[in-house]
Amino acid sequence: MHTLLPCDSHGASQWLRESSVGCLVTRFSDAWRGVIIEAAVQRDEYTIRWSNSTESIQSWDALLPYGTEWHARCIADQQRRLFERHRVRFPGTSFDEFKAKQVRERIAQEREAKALAEQAARAAAASAALKEKLKAERAAREALALTVRNLNDALCKTTVNPVRRVHTDLCELDYRLCLAWARVKLHQDDQASYELLERRVNEDQADRLVSARRAELAAKGFFQELGHEVIDVSILQVCGGNDQRWKDYDLLVDGKPVDIKNARHSLNSPDKYVEYCVPQFKIQRQTKANVIVVGVLSDYKKRDSRPSCDIASVILGEVGIDEINRLKNWTQRRFGTLIDFQGLWRANYQPGWAFEYPPEQYRERLEAIDEIDDVLRTPGALDPGFLRRLRWLFALRKDRGLVDTAPISEASRSLLNDLHDLKEECGLSRRSLFVFTIGAIIEAISRGDDPNQIIPPLRDAIFFPVETFDNTFRFPLGLSDPQEYVGSLINVFPIVFEEIRRRRIHFVGFKLTHPNILKGKVTADTWLTLFAYCGGKQEMARAKCGRSPLVLGLHATCPVCQHLICDKCNFCTSNCTAYLERKVRNDDNGEGPTVF
């Protein structure tokens, strides 16, 4: 059988694919179009006819060398046709020279193509490597962000809810104790109850005593829920026989004497208070040990409430005289030349910010703190885009040197080093952070700094970034501060700064006349109140006003006594002539507080 191959390349390719030699020859056919004239297959003989000859090949393997010759003929034929067609473009050039030039150009083109291919391959590899790097960096940032978030959660996690409610009415023994506090003697047939207590004293006094007993029971439940063994020593006053321990303390918590200080909310600042029912630190008479004080902030009983209604009490924490003395000594050394802190320390009044929860309330905190140094050393942790999310962790670090190389401002570095010193000497607590914040801000005011030079670095050093954590100001350095004592300073002092700048006031000294009253000395005889609380009392109300904080720039200053005027009750100081005039004028007119 004899088959002719069509001369067009498509037909040639089709025939070769269908023939017995197609699988070998077809790879050449498309590239050599026009070269093959005719091919035939007859039995085992393979015949290829070129444009100028015909050759027969007896074996399959013998066909292979023709590929090279076939290709060479193709190229030579193409070159000759090109040379003949464009001879005028190559004057004085022989065909051999033309071929050599074509070879050089082809080699150059091949080299260029190879270089471009290699360049493209390198670019593709670099792009792939960059993508992998960016992917790895993104994964590392996400992992670091998750680690920081988990660290934040662990630092802030509390064991027990400090809000306590004594749901049931007090028992007869509890009312006997309240009567004993009021120095009321029971007759033989008297049954101790709220009604009896109210008859023997008055409603306000009865509610105050009942609130104090509820506070003791709330504190007892708080410590029991933390896992401590608690003995109610206070009740021994009416059932303990000759046991006189109740004179020294109220509870025995794992053998540690604890005294309960109960306060009730101020009328116009529900999270604050201005006085305690229990006035001072005690000393255990047998051992001479200082008794730990636990602060409790309780609700008032509404007039229409049953005496058995559940009144909420918030456990503020505990404080001892030793902790107060250590903090007093540190602040005196650090800020003593600038601020007189004597009014900050009162044995008969401990403000809410002075308390801190026991370590058992933060069971995961110590373990989390141990991880901070490793987190800060993690690659990418100190990148500018990520640093602000964990800057506050520097205050809790153990390695002091970590802050020295961090890309932060000198103001931030100084604040963080101060916090590290405070942590080493006094420990970081709500009270130490409150006093430190006052000292750092007053130092900036005395230098005449712009508030933006101190407030943002101070906020970043103590608090979570707002965008990464809810209720930011309730967790200074992860410590629970439900009343936001520390955060309120960060919020109100920019107002004070602005008012000082507006009035162009220059202070020559500062003093805390009370744990919640800060004054600045303008002249030798003139002191201006920067922030305070209202010590007035609204006669128609059951509670003191207690408006807090009153802030320079937000509340008017009395022109006579230079104290801040309460916007709720007009009070400044009780013996101020301007206050008495305002009070008489408003009483006559039936008006509310005057706003200046």
Image: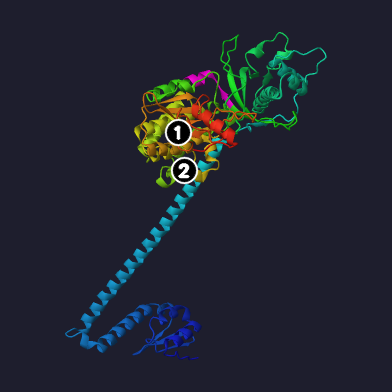
Residue 90 percent location from the top left of the image: 20, 84
- Residue 31 vertical placement versus 242 (above, below): below
Q: Nearer the viewer, residue 347 or 182?
A: 182
Q: Residue at 26% across / 78% down in the picture? A: 102
Q: Residues within 10 Å of mark 2 (few under 14, many from 20)?
A: many
- Residue 172 vertical placement versus 10 (above, below): above
Residue type at mark 1 is Ala
Left or right: where 171 falls relative to 379 = right
Residue 458 percent location from the top left of the image: 43, 36
Image label count = 2
Q: Residues within 10 Å of mark 1 (few under 14, many from 20)?
A: many
Please tell me whether residue 324 belongs to the stretch shown in magenta.
Answer: yes
Q: Nearer the viewer, residue 536 or 577?
A: 577
The residue pinned by badge 2 equals 389
Residue 423: in sight, yes or no? yes
Left or right: where 274 falls relative to 122 = right
Residue type at mark 2 is Arg
Q: Dot 1 lies on which element?
A: helix
Q: Residue at 63% across / 33% down in the picture? A: 161
Q: Circles 2 and 1: CB distance less than 8 Å?
A: no
Please tell me whether residue 577 belongs to the stretch shown in magenta.
Answer: no
- Residue 111 vertical placement versus 300 (above, below): below
The residue pinned by badge 1 equals 395
Q: Residue at 39% across / 87% down in the picture? A: 36
**Which residues are the magenta region?**
317-325
Q: Dot 2 lies on which element?
A: loop
Left or right: where 291 falls relative to 373 = right
Residue 40 percent location from the top left of the image: 45, 88
Q: Residue at 29% across / 75% down in the picture? A: 106
